Image: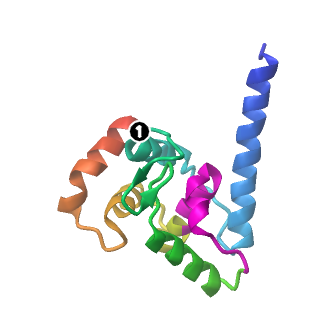
Amino acid sequence: MRTLHESIEVMKKLVLIVSMNLVLLTLGAKSPTFNWNPVMDAIIQVESEGNPKAVSGNSVGVMQITPILVEDCNNILQKKKSKKRYTLADRYSVEKSKEMFLLIQSYYNPSNSVEKAIRSWNGGVHYSVRATNRYFKKVMKLLK
């Protein structure tokens, strides 16, 4: 039997998943059938060890999001005729960082390629396989 604390944690996770799905549906994305949570969790560990206040140059938050990625997300939202926009401060929010990851994947990676998601998170949309090998291996090690 679960403790009250465990039940609350399960409910929080369910609310987060439902919220992210609703955001994607609102943005015009197809209903997500792929579970990106393990990939996002592994990326978070590699990028910041889960520290939402992590800063490295222009990259901040658990997923080490850059201002360029925020701008890219806002351009995608604009193309989708959404009024939603992200701010630079949103990079410090775990939930909004995950939303941005999901938005980027729905736009640039509709085939849900885990390899493409990991490599592009490190090297950008036009990543080099060679330049992203070390990062890819670190993330994959946490996924297995």
Q: Residue furthest top?
A: 1
Say which quarter of the image contains residue 45: top left
Q: Is residue 84 left or right of residue 108?
A: right
Q: Quadrant of the C terminus?
A: top left
Three-letter residue code for mark 1: Leu
Name the residue rendered at 34%, 59% in the picture: 122
- The residue shown at (69%, 86%) is 81
Q: Is residue 12 left or right of residue 64?
A: right
Q: Main secondary structure of the magenta part?
A: helix
Q: Position of residue 83 (x, y in %)?
A: 73, 80
Residue 43 colored magenta? Answer: no
Q: Is residue 8 left or right of residue 50?
A: right
Extreme residue toward the right, this view: 4
Quarter holding the N terminus is: top right
- Residue 119 location in percent, x, y? 33, 59
The residue carrying pointer 1 sits among few (fewer than 14), some (14 to 19) or many (20 or more) residues within 10 Å by Cα, namely few
Determine whether 112 is above or below 83 in the image: above
What segment carries the magenta color? 83-103
Q: Magenta span has 98? A: yes
SS at mark 1? helix
Residue sitting at x 40%, y 47%: 47
Q: How many marks?
A: 1
Which residue does the numbered mark 1 point to in the structure image?
A: 143
Q: Is residue 144 above or below residue 114?
A: above
Position in image of residue 21 (x %, y %): 70, 58
